[in-house]
Image: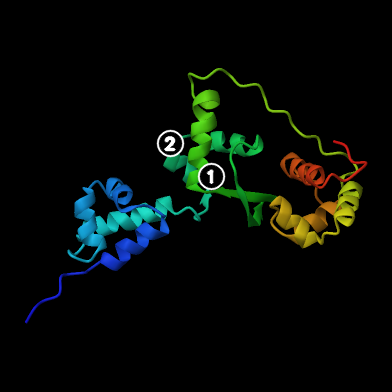
Amino acid sequence: MTRNPPTTGSSEIRGLRLRLQLSQPQFAALLGVSAETYRTWDSGRRAVPGALLDKARELAAIEDPLRLWSLQQLATELGVHVRTLRDGVRSGRLEVTYANHVVFRNPVPRSTIAAGRAFMERYYRKSYSRFAPKPWPPERTCVPPDWARQLLRIRREFQLTQAQLAEQIGAAGKAVVYQWESSKRTPSPVFWERILRLVQRGATPGWQR
């Protein structure tokens, strides 16, 4: 009787590779094995060693392009202080998504490993490392005192619901926009900048920064 070749772990490791959108040689390099060795696992010709399958799972968790990290987790992974990433968020240099819950009335930013690495490559070595020249502070957008009136007018001119506006600017939800429009909460300069960008993209007449 002819035995089928062992396939233990092959479908899982292949699925992890495809989720990361990597070629066989690319995933092999991350695992620290030759491309030919990896191909025997991916094709099911040989069983995947348990230690290498665990490593593949860890890599998939880290490299998953859709995974959102807290700034503290991302700072640990990138080897920088979390304050550096917070400054990147404030200056708009680090791309983030805001979670649905708030801490001290502020939305919680999260980011992907790809966005974190892009920030490191584009800005960290030039602006944040100890050898870099001290950067000029970024221009800050001032939130006008009549933000509630302006926001309500913008939303009506764009014919957006509070939920739709929140989605377009990355706010946690319509409750946040409601609090801004009712003056119960002041939008942060970051969010006001996003609102202004929305206005500029729509070329709404009569609106100035």
Residue 193 appears anywhere in the view: yes
Three-letter amino acid code of the residue under disc 1: Leu
The residue indicated by pointer 1 is 71
The residue indicated by pointer 2 is 79
Residue 39's label in the rendered image is: none
Q: Is residue 63 left or right of residue 3?
A: right
Q: Is residue 126 left or right of residue 50?
A: right
Quarter assignment of residue 99: bottom right
- Quarter of the picture holding the C terminus: top right
Q: In this view, does 23 lie to the left or right of 207?
A: left
Q: Earlier in the sequence, mark 2 or mark 1?
A: 1
Quarter assignment of residue 134: top right
Task: Please tell me which residue is depicted at 81% across the width and 47% down the height of the picture.
Answer: 202
Query: In x, y percent, where is residue 184?
Result: 83, 52
Distance of mark 2 from mark 1, alpha carbons?
12 Å
What kind of element bears circle 2?
loop
- Quarter of the picture holding the N terminus: bottom left
Query: In x, y percent, where is residue 114?
Result: 49, 45
Note whether 72 is above or below 11 in the view shown: above
Three-letter amino acid code of the residue under disc 2: Gly
Residue 105 appears anywhere in the view: no
Task: Please tell me which residue is depicted at 51% across the width and 29% down the height of the picture.
Answer: 124
Q: Is residue 65 left or right of residue 147?
A: left
Query: In x, y percent, where is residue 86?
Result: 59, 38
- For this rendering, which residue is in front, 66 or 76? 66
- For this rendering, which residue is in front, 111 or 208? 208
Q: 10 Å neighbourhood of mark 1: few (<14), some, or many (≥20)?
A: many
Task: Please tell me which residue is depicted at 88% across the width and 49% down the height of the picture.
Answer: 148
